[in-house]
Image: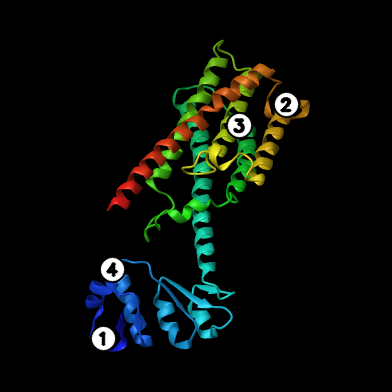
């Protein structure tokens, strides 16, 4: 324990060196609280400060996260803080941190899905242009994919339930970005699966040298099925879908179901066939496309498995230290 008298004789460097061994600061003035916050920040720590009085306002403002009391806190303290505990219950902080981590993860999953789909679509057009091939997807099909296919499933990823395991992971670094190297690796892996699979169908179908409605329908539907499996894979960064459950996000289930019904309408309804240049596919065609497009989901499940193995090893090494 360190009292205010001892703090008066210390500077930030001295306090930073011993603060790990201090559990209690007693008789601390507003200036002492500022000194404590500065000493922790100087070490690179993310500092959370709680307070309810006017004298706490400077330290609340300086801290990375200022937390004030909603019931008993002063207006000055509330204005200086970043978070207000309406119920004055400190356990609420844990709920807020859990929700914040979940939102961050959902944003990354949303971006992963959107980028992988966009990279795949653009790459298909670019590759067909470079090798002087017909465009695998026409303008209406690309528009359909962007508006209907990407819209509802992508939005539903933003409301994926937060897993309690996020609280077991260490905090992110202060300067950590949303767009990370791991995210881009995942994007290019998924986009690569979609590109290879869609081009395989396109080249296989146009082996006769002519572009028919069947060729474009198979390619179009293949890309859409890839999109749906990719969305399912993007529900979580490391946990398998079999672990989190297929029906834990009802909004996602409704969105994927709605998108698949829309795709069936696009290839089976006569007026839609004229718009998207499609024709009806057989049941076996659909089964073949589903099996092929599931490769993007399987590839990501394998990636998740190895990621979990690496995390377990790193956490084991950390606990031994």
The mark nearer the N terminus, 4 or 2, is: 4
In which image quadrant can residue 144 be found?
top right
Residue 147 visible in the picture: yes
Read off the residue under disc 1. 6
Residue furthest top as drawn: 208
Q: Are marks 2 and 3 in contact (CB under 8 Å)?
A: no
- What is the spatial separation of the Cα atoms under label 2 and label 1, in whole angstroms? 81 Å
- Residue picked out by circle 2: 273
Mark nearest the camera among 2 and 1 is 1
Q: Earlier in the sequence, mark 3 or mark 4?
A: 4
Q: Residues within 10 Å of mark 1 (few under 14, many from 20)?
A: few
- Of circles 2 and 3, the one toward us is 3
Residue drawn at the location 37% of the way across and 61% of the way down: 174
> CA gap, disc 4 to disc 2?
64 Å
Mark closer to the observer (3, 4): 4
Figure quadrant of residue 88:
bottom right
C-alpha gap between disc 2 and disc 3: 16 Å
Task: Answer with mark 1 or mark 4, whichever residue precedes in sequence.
Answer: 1
Residue at label 4?
43
Kind of element beneath mark 4: loop
């Amino acid at each position: 324990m360190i009292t205010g008298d001892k703090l008066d004789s210390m500077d930030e460097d001295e306090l930073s060196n011993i603060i790990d061994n201090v559990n209690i600061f007693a008789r601390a003035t507003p200036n002492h609280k500022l000194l404590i916050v500065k000493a922790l920040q100087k070490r690179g720590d993310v500092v959370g400060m709680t307070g309810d009085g006017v004298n706490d306002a400077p330290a609340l403002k300086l801290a990375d996260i200022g937390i004030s009391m909603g019931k008993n806190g002063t207006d000055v303290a509330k204005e200086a803080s970043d978070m207000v505990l309406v119920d004055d219950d400190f356990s609420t902080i844990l709920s807020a941190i859990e929700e914040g981590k979940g939102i961050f993860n959902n944003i990354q999953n949303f971006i992963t899905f959107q980028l992988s789909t966009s990279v795949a679509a653009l790459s298909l057009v670019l590759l067909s242009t470079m090798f002087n091939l017909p465009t695998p997807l026409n303008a209406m099909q690309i528009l359909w994919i962007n508006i209907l296919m990407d819209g509802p499933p992508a939005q539903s990823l933003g409301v994926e339930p937060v897993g309690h395991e996020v609280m077991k992971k260490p905090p992110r670094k202060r300067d950590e970005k949303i767009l990370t190297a791991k995210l881009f690796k995942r994007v290019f892996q998924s986009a690569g699966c979609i590109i290879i699979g869609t081009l395989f169908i396109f080249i296989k179908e146009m082996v006769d040298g002519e572009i028919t409605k069947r060729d474009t329908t198979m390619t179009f539907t293949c890309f859409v099925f890839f999109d749906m499996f990719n969305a399912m894979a993007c529900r979580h960064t490391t946990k398998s879908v079999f672990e989190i459950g297929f029906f834990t996000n009802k909004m996602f289930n409704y969105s994927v179901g709605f998108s698949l019904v829309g795709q069936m309408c696009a290839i089976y309804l006569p007026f839609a066939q004229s718009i998207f240049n499609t024709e009806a596919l057989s049941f076996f065609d659909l089964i073949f496309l589903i099996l092929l497009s599931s490769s993007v989901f399987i590839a990501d499940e394998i990636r998740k498995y190895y990621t979990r193995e690496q995390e377990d090893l790193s956490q084991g090494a950390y606990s031994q230290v």
